[in-house]
Amino acid sequence: MNLYRSHTCGELTAKNASEIVKLSGWIYRRRDHGGVIFIDLRDNYGVTQVVFHPESGLIDEVSSLGLESVITVEGTVLKRDDAQINPNMVTGEIEISVNNLQVQSNVESLPWSVIDDSIPEELRLRDRVLDLRTEGQHAMMHFRSDVISTMRNTMTGMGIREFQTPILTASSPEGARDFLVPSRVHPGKFYALPQAPQQFKQMLMVAGFDKYFQVAPCFRDEDPRADRHPGEFYQLDCELSFVEQKDVFNVGEKLMSEVFNAHCPEGAVIDQAPFRQIPYAESMLKYGCDKPDLRNPIEIFDISSVWLESDFAVFKGIVEQGGVVRAIPAKGAGVQPRSWFDKLGKYAQKELRMPAAPGYIVKNEDGTFKGPLVKFLKEEQVQAIFEEAGLTETNDTIFLVAGNEKNVLSPLAALRNKIAADLDMFEKNTFRFAWIVDFPMYEEEDGKIDFSHNPFSKPQGGMDDLLNKKPEDILAQQYDCVCNGYEIASGSIRNADIPSMFKAFEIAGYTKEEVEENFEGMLKTFRLGVPPHGGFAFGIERIIMIMKDETNIRRVIAFPLNGRAKCLLTGAPLEANETQMNELHLRHFNLPEVALD
RNA sequence: GGGGAUGUAGCUCAGUUUUGGUUAGAGUGUCGGCCUGUCACGCCGAAGGUCGCGGGUUCAAGUCCCGUCAUUCCCGCCA
């Protein structure tokens, strides 16, 4: 018998009655009846009730132990009387009558109770191990492990090998801010932590490995969001040689299907392969964003032109000056009280910072329409708008948003979701996937052309496009995978043609010399014979979040940083001491006082 | 860098607006006592407060004003 246990706390049943067993675990709960004491003993596998009777001579000792103390008990498995069986526990048919107790670790005081589910996040992060002991958080970490395991099995099952790539590497100019690591042996020089293994995985393709994947840590110095952990996160990163976009999609769809089918709750509706493909432009029109939540049935549509023939000067003027008017159909919203419309208007103005509350038109019982904008349109025009929206019933409603296209898209996207949420239109227990395809290669801001995504994506028309099209019109073989309103993956077919790579960077304002310098290693390898290749990277934490219906990414990370990128457990980031600073040839200057903490 | 929300006992929260006013309450946990069949055991009792911090107004501030800090959500940022 092992020194600490013969069984775990989750496995003993009536079958084991009268066996002599040894269990080890944490004191979860104690019920002290003076003469007899019950303890729920917990380990990774479950909870077992152990009983101390007066004859054991252990009553005083066990009642002095704090909750969460670690103990080892030895005793006899007793089948409980029928009246005492606890049907809520796997081990509820039995209990252990203890005759030997060994204290492994006594706890004198606890900052908070593991059973209490109302503890604020700040304390959960500070006392992280306690939080990880709670049932929900403990199960979450098991879940994460299982999901990653399925990912690995699925990838290797497709004949794709796992590789490791450097963590100490070179900074690359595009993208988020880098984390820099000062070099001791090269004074004044810095490594960068990889934002993704992008260049290395492409080099592995050049090296002829054909297929690659990695559970890859990625480091980006961005400000956090609820779905974005500051600093570091994991991607299921993949790259494939001699592939077209559809081959990459096949692999991604197989991966998602295996993971979601295996780990989503019973009865969940899961989109199966092949996933819908939505061109970027269509997604922006219908959903106002490039990561639509397709559980929401609402589709936005454009009704700009009708206002040119109307008397409503505001909308007419907006359209004449190149702006747009977009409509959000809201089936049955007319039954909502006036206060709902008012609240929605306030939400739009306050939270979405829209200059005015969205207008709306409601269909009346007698087939006429009401709403402040009705009088500016002919009845046939309103009728036509409702027909286009597929709205035919009394109280069906259309919301209108007008303005410069760039400014209205994100409010439209938010309103679409807000309306659907308020009206309970979201599909439940459902996972809707889509590939967003045909991303623009470039975007223009204040007259400056920049890459809108990955600079190594292949322009759809190759060199021809780069030479002959307006930059804003060039599409890339670039795609995202979205699920339930989250971007869960991004990828592209890469540009393996060196001349068009230079041309692509030139359009974004980079000289040949700059490109040579910044991507020296990759260019050097490309000149040694590069196969056509492409790939993707799925955000592992986000996928787990979605499957568990969590809204905060910290819930799926064992030791997360808080919302201000601090570790409340270790205190990181901390100051370096003088010796370290000297060795690294670093010196502070202009240090703002707040950063010292 | 900007905006919103929150901050009262170890923890969760009430009290803060309408109306500033004697000793700031409850639940839970902790500690002490009782209890031989509970399973979130029960009963009795006790301790526990810089009302985030600083300043101001006032005879008087948890409450009003200004500033600041912390946490969180959002915008910017995220090839």
Image: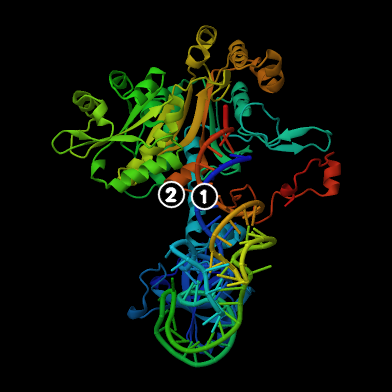
Q: Quadrant of residue A178?
A: top right
The residue sitting at 42% across, 48% down in the picture is A549
Image height check: is A572 above or below B2?
Answer: below
Judge whether residue A572 can be spotted in this image.
yes
Extreme residue toward the left, this view: A366
B62 or B42, nearer to the observer: B62
The residue sitting at 45% across, 22% down in the picture is A245
* Cβ–Cβ under 8 Å for marks 2 and 1: yes
Q: Is residue A556 left or right of residue A231?
A: left
Q: Which mark is residue A548?
A: 2
Amino acid at circle 2? Lys
The x and y percentages for residue A280 are: 43, 25
Q: Quadrant of the N terminus of chain A?
A: bottom right
User: What SS does tag 1 mark?
Assistant: helix
Q: Quick one: label 1, few (<14), some, or many (20+) residues within 10 Å?
A: many
- The chain ID associated with circle 1 is A
User: What SS does tag 2 mark?
Assistant: loop
The x and y percentages for residue A432 are: 36, 37
C-alpha distance separating marks 2 and 1: 9 Å
Image height check: is A345 above or below A597?
Answer: above
- The chain ID associated with circle 2 is A
Amino acid at circle 1? Val
Q: Which mark is residue A289?
A: none
The residue sitting at 22% across, 33% down in the picture is A391
Q: Quadrant of residue A408?
A: top left
Q: Is residue A235 left or right of residue A184?
A: left
**Tag 1 residue:** A556
